[in-house]
Image (spheres, rainbow, N blue to C red):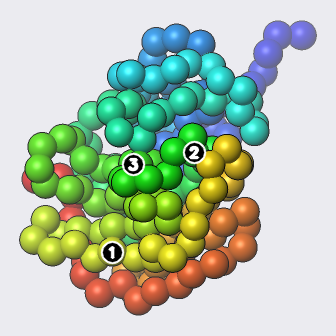
Amino acid sequence: CDNQENVELVWDGNYIMVHHFEEISGTRFDSTVNHFNGAPSNVVHNNVGVIDGADNFNGASSFLSLGTSSVLQPLVGTISVWLNASAVSGIRTIFTGSTGGTVRRHPYLRIYNGNLQFVITNNVAEEWHFGSTPVSINKDYFVTVTWDGSTTVLYVDGVAVDSETQIITPVGNT
């Protein structure tokens, strides 16, 4: 029997983007109907992951370019990643809606001096959330951050470890 899998229908309209990092080179394909396929830059391909494949991002100069769609800067949302950091000093970007330059874009999930941090911006002000949840090197974490317009919540390995009031309303790329 032929493969009857329909990858795009597995992830409903509530998912903006899902990457499995199973490709060993070239484009990283989004499993949703949105097709936010990414072009990797300075990424080590096909490392062993917790689930399926994985890519090694150095937290400083490697990234997956996904374009500039404002859909990638939602007013409310969730980001979930498997994380295994080889370094935690300074600023280590995990996910950003940034398109480069000096203006930080929403949403921005990072390791900041050894702690998980989430930043929301409206391009005038930044709101930093969390910052006291440490990350160790060479340890697997399942990290999720949610924001709903009034509260941000940080989950590590399925447990809510921090919750803070959200003050500003984020905006996307302009």
Crowding near the residue tagged with mark 2, few <14, some 14–19, many ≥20 C-alpha atoms within 10 Å: many
Label located before the other in sequence (2 or 1): 2
Residue for badge 1: 128
From this view, report whether residue 160 is shown above or below residue 40: below
Residue found 44% across the figure and 53% down from its top: 89
Q: Disc 3 to disc 2, how far (Cα)?
A: 11 Å
From this view, report whether residue 79 is shown above or below residue 87: below
Q: Where is residue 132 in the image (x, y as percent from the top left)?
A: 51, 76
The reply to whether callout 2 and callout 1 are in contact (CB within 8 Å) is: no
Residue for badge 2: 85
Q: Position of residue 128 (x, y in %)?
A: 33, 74
The reply to whether callout 3 and callout 2 are in contact (CB within 8 Å) is: no
Choose between 146 and 56: the one closer to the eye.
Answer: 56
* Left or right of 139, for residue 23: left
Residue for badge 3: 93
Q: Disc 1 to disc 3, how far (Cα)?
A: 14 Å
Q: Position of residue 105 (x, y in %)?
A: 23, 56
